[in-house]
């Protein structure tokens, strides 16, 4: 709108001050045209159009009348008629207003007519008097046209499927978000009618649907305390579905920078009263469109706060153990541009980012892009998702399931239930993130079977970095962790007063189609005689050299002993029954001794430690299978006091 009004101003200032007269000599046409200008100034476009028709009946070569008609058609979303009017003006006199080439190109690019738009931009670029003011803009427009021609000639596979009437309605549905198991969908609906079908003030609320037997249930309003009389939208939910962040905009009249990010937690079947995130996440600027990492400890969002690269940038904040959020970091010029970057979505693999940008070269407007993390603060050059996922219209609000093969987004395409519907589609292979699986189960007391709230840590064994921190539900002990394949992981579960639990997930060479693992985690209270198996201590075959991947587990044992200074333990080594009994006993004893020496080196008192090797004398599984023998080859510790 601003560009159009600026163009009108330029046209008539140039006409008045340079040409000193209109392109017509018809006084009647000029009189009617001036009336049309007044109607245009008051946005009475229908009256302005009727007057312009009358002016052209008096002189069909009246260039200014054709140009104003073109601008009105553009604002009325009638691009074909706009182009037709611009073309008539240029045929009458191609030199009188050279800005017309630029204006016509803008309309052509808005409907995907890249070839004609390219010709007009290149023609406009030959007029040197405009280079200083429009040179950079036109260069970018030319790049968009060339990319658009290439993209439309080489479309990517794309077959969007409507989610159906249980999700979509006569209203607009958009901003979908999905739990890691793919069973819970939360989205925004713009409600314009009440239950009695009476028109009401447009209201954005959250709705929720559950997948049962591959079918989405009828969506329900999430209700209080999340939905209010204000507008709520653009949510993101943690992998386990227990934490949600979203945007709420309580705008006063005329206030645009009024959107902030809120957080709420699931408690049983309800949600806690949402809390607006304090500074440094929310500021006096516009913060919106949050996206949580799978463990809920990293928050991505879009903001026009100070310190950015353009209008709206993507920022990232990490959460501390005390639940506070750190000062947000701008994702830098590998993601952000002088344009607008919005609607970030970080996949469960924690390294693939999808977002919307008007700054990177695309097909016009806002396009969807993908980038992969290559370091803690750097990313690959964003890749356009291609045509027809992207078009000359605005696209945003894309999410991808944990498995990485399906995406969801909102579209106003024909054939839907309302203005905008939510669709899903198969994501082309080169646009997919690393497949992620989820681990789900329950934590409970090994003796009483009481459900327990416990702390989870998932550790990348190669880098020794903690990649996920989470907790089991305090009410039912349930948990869900989302982890990318192609890595090996150590899982550690701990709770004060209990022995910790460890497990191992070897997914580095995984080609399995398995989507999830179900495990139960029994925690034993710290009592004399209790045994804890250390599943993430690794040795070279038939040797007692500790592999580097063992450090994470060993350090957990160090922490356990420091946190429980009255505990004394015996490190115990075991083997399978392959080989001679004497050799196995010596090997298991040496392996236990290596762990013993590691603990002493970490300032654990020798008086609190013993070690022993038992060879194959205390199996916990059969030695007739490789899986059983693997369980028998173990290191553990026993509470001796």
Image (tube, grey):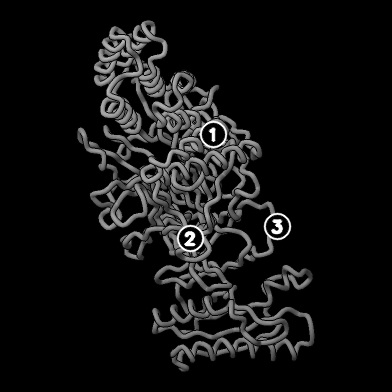
Q: On residue 119, which mark appears?
A: 1
Indicate the secondary structure of the residue bearing disc 3.
loop
In the image, residue 296 lies at what x, y percent? 42, 55
Secondary structure, mark 1, is helix
| N-terminal-most mark, 2 or 1 | 1
Left or right of 166, for residue 27: left
Q: Say few, some or many: other residues with alpha carbon within 10 Å of mark 2 (under 14 / 14 to 19 / 20 or more).
A: many
Residue behind mark 2: 444
Of circles 2 and 1, which is in front? 1
Residue 3 image position (x, y, % from top left): 35, 33
Q: State the image coordinates of residue 102 (x, y, percent, origin top left).
A: 44, 33
Image position of 270 with respect to 328: above or below: above
C-alpha separation, residue under disc 2 versus residue under disc 3: 32 Å
Nearest to the observer: residue 359 or residue 526? 359
Residue drawn 61% across and 59% down? 485
Q: Which quadrant: the N terminus?
A: top left
Along the polypeptide, which appears first: circle 1 or circle 3?
1
Q: Furthest residue to the bottom?
A: 606
Q: Which residue is mark 3?
A: 511
């Amino acid at each position: 709108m601003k560009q159009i009004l600026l163009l009108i101003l330029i046209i008539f200032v140039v006409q008045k001050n340079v040409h000193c007269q209109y392109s017509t000599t018809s006084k009647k046409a000029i009189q009617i045209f001036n009336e049309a200008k007044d109607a245009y100034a008051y946005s009475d476009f229908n009256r302005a159009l009727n007057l312009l028709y009358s002016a052209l009946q008096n002189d069909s070569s009246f260039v200014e009348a054709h140009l104003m008609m073109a601008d009105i058609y553009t604002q009325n979303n009638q691009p074909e008629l706009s182009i037709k009017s611009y073309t008539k003006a240029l045929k009458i006199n191609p030199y009188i207003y050279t800005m017309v080439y630029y204006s016509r190109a803008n309309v052509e690019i808005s409907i995907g007519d890249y070839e004609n738009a390219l010709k007009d931009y290149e023609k406009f670029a030959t007029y040197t008097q405009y280079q200083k003011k429009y040179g950079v803009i036109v260069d970018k427009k030319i790049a968009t046209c060339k990319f658009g021609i290439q993209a439309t000639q080489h479309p990517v596979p794309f077959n969007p499927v409507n989610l159906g009437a249980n999700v979509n309605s006569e209203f607009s549905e958009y901003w979908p978000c999905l739990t890691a198991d793919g069973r819970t969908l939360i989205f925004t609906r713009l409600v314009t009618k009440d239950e009695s079908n009476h028109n009401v003030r447009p209201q954005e609320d959250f709705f929720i649907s559950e997948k049962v037997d591959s079918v989405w249930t009828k969506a329900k309003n999430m209700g209080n305390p999340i939905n209010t009389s204000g507008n709520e939208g653009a949510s993101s939910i943690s992998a386990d579905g227990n934490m949600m962040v979203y945007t709420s905009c309580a705008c006063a009249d005329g206030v645009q920078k009024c959107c902030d990010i809120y957080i709420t937690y699931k408690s049983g079947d309800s949600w806690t009263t949402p809390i607006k995130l304090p500074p440094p996440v929310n500021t006096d600027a516009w913060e919106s469109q949050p996206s949580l990492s799978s463990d809920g400890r990293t928050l991505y969002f879009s903001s026009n706060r100070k310190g950015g690269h353009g209008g709206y940038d993507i920022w990232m904040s990490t959460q501390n153990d005390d639940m506070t959020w750190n000062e947000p970091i701008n994702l830098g010029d590998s993601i952000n541009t002088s344009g607008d970057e919005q609607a970030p979505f970080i996949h469960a693999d924690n390294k693939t980012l999808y977002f919307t940008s008007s700054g990177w070269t695309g097909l016009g407007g806002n396009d969807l892009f993908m980038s992969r993390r290559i370091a803690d603060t750097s990313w690959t050059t964003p890749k356009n998702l291609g045509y027809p996922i992207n078009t000359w219209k605005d696209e945003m609000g894309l999410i991808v399931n944990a498995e990485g093969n399906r995406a969801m987004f909102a579209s106003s395409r024909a054939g839907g239930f309302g203005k905008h519907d939510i669709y899903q589609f198969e994501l082309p292979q080169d646009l997919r993130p690393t497949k992620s699986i989820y681990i789900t189960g329950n934590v409970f007391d090994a003796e009483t079977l009481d459900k327990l709230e416990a702390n989870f840590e998932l550790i990348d064994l190669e880098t020794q970095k903690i990649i996920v921190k989470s907790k089991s539900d305090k009410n039912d002990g349930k948990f869900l962790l989302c982890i990318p394949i192609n890595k090996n992981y150590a899982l550690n579960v701990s709770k004060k007063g209990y022995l910790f639990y460890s497990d191992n997930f070897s997914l580095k060479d995984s080609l399995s189609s398995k989507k999830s693992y179900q495990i139960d985690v029994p925690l034993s209270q710290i009592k004399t005689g209790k045994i804890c198996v250390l599943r993430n201590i690794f040795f070279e075959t038939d040797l007692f050299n500790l592999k580097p991947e063992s450090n994470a587990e060993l350090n957990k044992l160090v922490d356990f002993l420091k946190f429980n200074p009255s505990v004394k333990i015996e490190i115990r080594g075991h083997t399978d029954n392959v080989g001679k009994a004497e050799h196995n006993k010596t090997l298991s004893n040496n392996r236990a001794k290596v762990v013993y020496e590691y603990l002493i080196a970490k300032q654990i008192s020798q008086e609190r430690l013993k070690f022993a090797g038992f060879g194959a004398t205390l199996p916990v599984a059969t030695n007739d299978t490789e899986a059983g023998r693997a369980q028998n080859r173990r290191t553990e510790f026993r509470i001796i006091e």
